Image (spheres, helix red, strand yellow):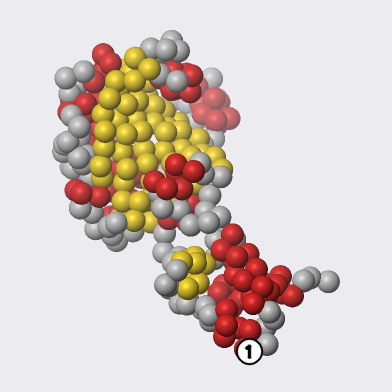
Amino acid sequence: MASKWRELADRLAEQIKNGEYGPGDQLPQIREQVEAGEGSKSTVHQAYKALESEGLVTSSRGHGTVVRPRAPLKRLGIARYDKAKWRDGDEVAFIADRVASERTYKRTEQTQTVSRVVASDLVAEGLGVPAGSEVYARARLVKEGTQPTHTLTSYYRLEHVEGTRIVDPTPGPAGRGGGYRVLYDAGYEIDHMKEALLARVPTANEVKLLQLPVGEPVVELHRTTYTADGTVVEFAVGIHAASRFAWEYDFKVPDSARDQRTEDGGPGAQ
């Protein structure tokens, strides 16, 4: 049999999920729950802490226990890198996410630092350079209003970006079209990329930097960007607050067997 605090937590969780308590609503104060016969102060407190650890509510002094908002940004997949956005326009990838989510963007919502650093083993492998090589790191903290959404650090080989806008530390995107337009103008047109995602518990520094509530995981992104001949021109590591994004992918389903038959002169070959 479940404990009393667990029963209360489960009942409140169900009320949150079915909309009885909507985003931004405040749950009854602990004193009110005790007076309503929901259990002792300790029981109600433990139930609220369970809801917080499960990511359903946030608790703070002066604001009580509030249901977390459920209106995450769309984090587009393939569509966010459409060349028409950055090559022919000025819509860089993370702005494309905001457009898709019907959100606005201000230049002050991205801050950045640019520096030459020694590549870690992860970065060296991602860029395809020897461990210990010096590379450029362009680190960004991106916000929606005053709320941080994610960090993203792009690493580049020195010879690819030296003297370009990518190494200009001015806050905001690297000029019209962002970093991919800079690479394009330098003769490195991006052709394909690989992304890997993993969810994990945040570090103490990430909790502070992204202003994460208790129990909030992060999604770590590794992105490798290639030219048509397979040259790696960017390796990026992003740390995203898990509840602030809904990851969306829309792509054509490959059929490698059919493609191979076509190459071999089978049905469909010209």
Q: Residue furthest top?
A: 130
Which residue type does callout 1 highlight? Ala
Which residue: 53% across, 20% down? 264
Q: Quadrant of the C terminus?
A: top left
**Residue 234 to residue 91: above or below:** above
Asked whether, in this view, residue 264 is left or right of residue 70, the answer is right
Residue at point 31%, 46% (across, down): 142
Residue 206 or residue 92, whichever sits in front: 206
Picture coordinates of residue 215, whole percent (x, y): 56, 55
Residue at 18 percent of width and 29 percent of height: 168
The answer to whether 187 is drawn above or below residue 92 in the figure is above
Q: Quadrant of residue 44?
A: bottom right
Q: Which residue is mark 1?
A: 36
The crowd level at tag 1 (other Cα within 10 Å; few <14, some 14-19, many 20+) is few
264 versus 251 height, above or below: above
Rendered-image quadrant of the N terminus: bottom right
Front-most of residues 254 and 204 = 204
Q: Is residue 11 visible?
A: no
Callout 1: SS = loop
| Number of numbered tags placed on the structure image | 1
Seen in the image, is 10 located left or right of residue 200? right
Q: Position of residue 227 (x, y in %)?
A: 34, 22
> Picture coordinates of residue 248 (x, y %)?
45, 51
Task: Indicate the position of residue 181 as horizontal and vertical percent values.
Answer: 21, 32
Q: Is residue 128 left or right of residue 41?
A: left
Q: Quadrant of residue 183?
A: top left
